[in-house]
Amino acid sequence: MPYQAASDRYDSMVYRRCGRSGLLLPAISLGLWHNFGDVDTFENGRATVRRAFDLGITHFDLANNYGPPPGSAEESLGRILAADLRPYRDELIISSKAGYTMWPGPYGDWGSRKYLVASCDQSLKRMGLEYVDIFYHHRPDPETPLEESMGALDYIVRSGRALYAGISNYPAELAVEAINILRNLGTPCVIEQPSYNMFNRWVEERLLSTLEAEGVGCIVFTPLAQGLLTDRYLGGQIPADSRAGRGHGALRRSAITEDKVAKVERLNELAQERGQSLAQMAIAWVLRNPAVTSALIGASRVAQIEENVAALQKLSFTADELACIEQILAG
Ligand SMILES: NC(=O)c1ccc[n+]([C@@H]2O[C@H](COP(=O)([O-])OP(=O)(O)OC[C@H]3O[C@@H](n4cnc5c(N)ncnc54)[C@H](OP(=O)(O)O)[C@@H]3O)[C@@H](O)[C@H]2O)c1
């Protein structure tokens, strides 16, 4: 039976404006960094994407190198689009990126125009798309003039390969430079994609307020600290089917330290007092700042998508709860 999207898919998702642009993004977006490679089960990933869309998640985030092997997550999404989501293309925001090592030689990495344009073309081919909605420079390149990398993004948008330009992992000062270059070129930077979660708060120092002042949206990746801020590793256990347990994921077993687990357990108690799971509280916590447009989660199964989207039922925090979180994190 062909897939038919749920008719109530727009009833409960919250959509937030991406900076001062016309683009609305779901408060929770799904990234395909893990769980969609050739090493994963295709039907599980397919079910996850379908459930996400049925729950109002309209934004799916990719990059050239997601897999493993690199490129295979985009190929998986291409298959899901072809099988299920093609009729809904105009309801979807699909992003991709280039900036990390993708192919051998001097033109398969960093931020030259040569690499960014060629990589964008490869991504479109893998996904079977005519255009992506957002194309990002994945990380700053200290060797290439910023004008060249931003000029490539401008060209990618003007040539119809992408609708919007974005930057990822740019620190505040460089972000402002990039935003200004793009603005002067007439292709505004619509979004920045930095990491942000309770254990990694660098964006609070300057980046979030800078983006807000510039009118640029912000989608934050790893809001669950790759699964640490969930019930996955409570008690210090490392389940065999978890990211840390599976071995090919980016979360090292060594990152599950006693100190982190002790904090996670206290945060988990607070989440329960709020009537939420820890994953739900961690998502609500990154969304508490209006400068954050969307929390970019990952999910290895349908149940995680359902649990995480239900975070939207309780986004508010009391001052006491926020203070308690600060105390736990500082402890
Ligand atoms: N721009 C960049 O440089 C960059 C870098 C990293 C990521 N990203 C983007 O951000 C996206 C999200 O990254 P991420 O996957 O690390 O995010 P995350 O949301 O912090 O972690 C997701 C992982 O946490 C676990 N999880 C999720 N919900 C759960 C729940 N309710 N209960 C228990 N465990 C749960 C799952 O791992 P298990 O396998 O253990 O179930 C899941 O794969 C990526 O897909 C990518 O699009 C971008």
Image (cartoon, rainbow, N blue to C red):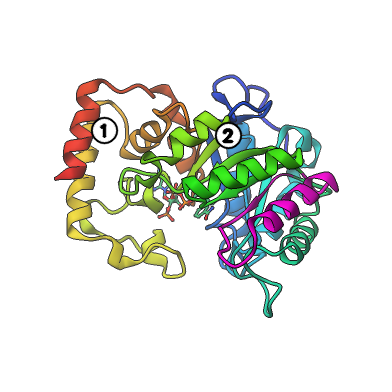
Report the residue at 52% width, 51% height from top. Answer: 170
Residue 234: image location, x then y, percent? 24, 51
Task: Locate the C terminus by quadrant.
Answer: top left
323 on left or right of 15 = left
Task: Give 157 or 75, whichever is nearer the viewer.
Answer: 157
Q: What residue range appears in magenta?
A: 133-162
Task: Locate the N terminus by quadrant.
Answer: top right
Q: CA distance from mark 1 to mark 2?
A: 31 Å
Report the residue at 56% width, 63% height from top. Answer: 40
Can residue 144 be seen at all in this image of the molecule? yes
Can residue 50 be seen at all in this image of the molecule? no
Report the residue at 62% width, 64% height from top. Answer: 65
286 on left or right of 71 = left
99 on left or right of 270 = right
The answer to whether 32 is drawn above or below residue 291 in the figure is below
Q: Secondary structure at mark 1?
A: helix
User: Amino acid under label 2?
Assistant: Val
Mark 1: few/some/many CA within 10 Å (<14, 14-19, 20+)? some
Mark 2: few/some/many CA within 10 Å (<14, 14-19, 20+)? many
Task: Name the image quarter holding residue 209.
Answer: top left
Task: Give 9 or 108, whichever is nearer the viewer.
Answer: 108
According to the image, label 2 marks what residue?
216
According to the image, label 1 marks what residue?
271
Residue lying at the far left of the rendered structure = 331
CB within 8 Å, label 1 to label 2? no
| Residue 3 disc label | none
146 in the magenta segment: yes
Report the residue at 77% width, 60% height from top. Answer: 117
Q: Secondary structure at mark 2?
A: loop
User: Amino acid under label 1?
Assistant: Ala
